[in-house]
Image (cartoon, rainbow, N blue to C red):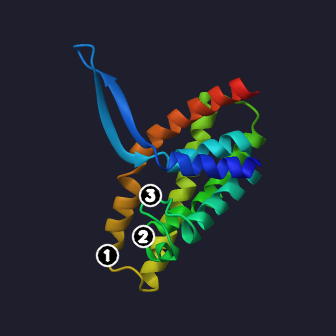
Amino acid sequence: MKAITGVMLIIICSMIPSFIILPKGDLSLSIIPLHSNWQIPGLLLTSLLCGPKIATISAISYIIIGLFYLPVFHGGGSVGYILTNEFGYLLGFIPAAWTCGYLVKKNQNENLINFTAYTAISLAVMHCTGITYLVLSKIFGNLINNLSDLILVNTFILLPNQLLLCISISLLALLFKKIIL
């Protein structure tokens, strides 16, 4: 049951755009889009709340659903998604989910700094998996584009926004843990 909840959380979060709300001098609000969605934070939230086993099952289920049933990925879905540059990052969901859940389970000290560190480490694991997939795709001839450009676009340009979302997701996880438990 928890795995189904985790998958649903990731799917729902993948449909929510991310942004920062800042107050202006005239007391109105300014919305700055982050050009990302909550797909990765949904995975990390599942990991923080449910632990390594449920988070890993949720990540695997999410990838299977996106490949064979529904276009839930950021760029759509289907089996053809395996040949895209982004698929390695989706594969990185699996070790990232396990890593984050394991760190939470191992270290019982639940606070914002620890949760943010766990999510940032898991984000790094996901990006390392994605970069490895890009390198292997380049070696085996699946990539037409320049490898360094792909790594820049898929990792380093997105990383600052994703790190900001790690802080937000850590706050949400702490809030949910206080409400639920």
Question: Which comes before the other along the chain, label 3 or label 1?
Answer: 3
Residue holding disc 2: 85
Tell me if mark 2 has few (under 14), some (14-19) or many (20+) residues whose alpha carbon lies within 10 angstroms of its own. Answer: many
At label 3, the amino acid type is His
Q: Secondary structure at mark 2?
A: loop
Q: Secondary structure at mark 1?
A: loop
- In the rendered image, residue 170, in percent from the top left (x then y), is placed at 58, 34
Q: Secondary structure at mark 3?
A: loop
Residue 109: quarter of image: top right
Residue at point 42%, 70% (across, down)? 85
Note whether 178 is above or below 69 in the view shown.
above
Residue holding disc 3: 74
- In the rendered image, residue 58, in percent from the top left (x then y), is placed at 67, 55
Residue holding disc 1: 145
The Cα atoms of the two marked residues, 2 and 1, are separated by 10 Å
Q: Is residue 127 left or right of residue 63?
A: left
Note whether 71 is above or below 138 in the view shown.
above
